[in-house]
Image (tube, rainbow, N blue to C red):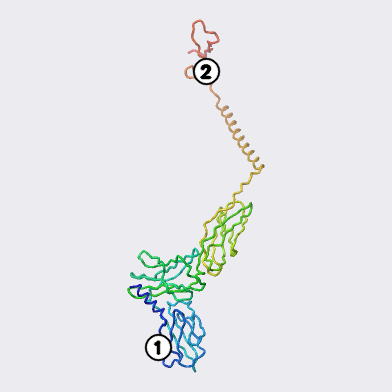
Amino acid sequence: MADLITFIWFSMLLTVTYSQTPTPEDSPIKNITLDMKTMFLRWTNVENVNNISCSVKVLSKLEYRIPAEKNECELKPDYPWCQGVDFEIEGFAGKRFLETFQIPRRGKEGTTEESLSCQVHDANLMDCKWTVRETLRDIQYQFFYSQNANAFADRECPKYKTDSEGRHVGCHFDNLSGFTELEGYHFLVTGTSSGREVQCNDKYIELSKIEIFKPPNININCTNITCSIQWQIPKRRELWETSFEYQLQIQKVADKNILESGGPVTTKETNFDFKITDGKYTVKIRTRKLFENAPWSEWSEPQEFGHEVHRDIPLSVLMFSLLGIAFIILLILGYLCKRYYVIQKIFPPVPRIKDQVSDSFHQYNEVLWEENKILPEQCKIEEIQVIGKK
């Protein structure tokens, strides 16, 4: 039911004529119609009229004014239709006249999408998305686009993206080969809820202005003091003549400070020379088209370059270091020797009688007992001195 109502609404817009309220009886022009396919505003002259012009207003703001040719004006369709459009036809037929033709704002207030945006990526893919300000239980959205530039949207999304509740929240295009013109294409989101039309949202978008790119691959060649950073222009639609600008972010690994930022660079073969000192660096790059407000690509993954330089220790420093170590060792040895000598002087060893049992037993020679065969030198006689008697 919702799809049926949507297509009925579109068939209404795309009919050969779009009607208006009757013009006053005294108006010099009658039968004002709008052909949505050819974008011509036409009328019938019932009196001699001259100096006729057509003005287009959206939300009471003048978009443009163009002169009429005979009894028609060819309109520029690059304004939002969903906000409602007022067409004013004015001229002279004896006196000045002004007639208004109006396309009203459509849909229930409060059910419009907050935003409608599209992005072209990977040269031949496009994704469009919209967000819903007020979610109704049975709301469903449809997305329409024009295959011809500056034409009203008349084709439905080839592949919808849905949320967890099955609502259409985006549209994906696998192939953009049909979009061959540089002018703006019409994109429109509308829908239904409880059998009623919701407010639509639309805009004309030049695809060349919404293309985003993958960051280029970087090649780095370093000499002793200079590194040449090179990259190729990103993959893009060959249909559009494109110049690019790039940003390089280079920082030293040790301090994390950004050292260089380059761009814009617009050559097809691009490079950037960077003088290095000791240490390692990282570089990452992003790119965009060279015109105002173009979106930047994502940053590339940081790539490391540069080298650690190990300096030789000067011989004088080495000699001083060794002499210092030797001096410290001598100080320690002198201190230990002096301390041992002082302790010996203060606490001399006490003389004592050797105890054959408790003293070290291994310092005496063992003698094999054989009667009458013991040599005198093997039987040592201890001299005992009697100190006194009790």
Percent x, y of residue 41: 46, 83
Percent x, y of residue 357: 47, 17
Percent x, y of residue 226: 63, 54
Amino acid carrying label 2: it is Gln
Residue, disc 2 = 363
Residue, disc 1 = 22
Examine the rendered structure and indicate whether residue 2 appears above or below residue 52: above
Between marks 1 and 2, how big is the CA–CA gap? 142 Å
**Earlier along the polypeptide chain: callout 1 or callout 2?**
1
Examine the rendered structure and indicate whether residue 359 appears above or below residue 245: above
- Residue 86, by quadrant, is bottom left
Q: Residue 327 bears which disc, if any?
A: none
Amino acid carrying label 1: it is Pro
Task: Decide if residue 324 is on the left or right side of residue 128.
Answer: right
**SS label for mark 2:** helix
Examine the rendered structure and indicate whether residue 336 appears above or below residue 196: above
**Split into 4 quadrants, where in the image is the N terminus?**
bottom left
The residue lying furthest to the right in this view is: 316
Task: Decide if residue 324 is on the left or right side of residue 362.
Answer: right
Percent x, y of residue 276: 61, 54
Which of 321/79 is in front? 79
**SS label for mark 1:** loop
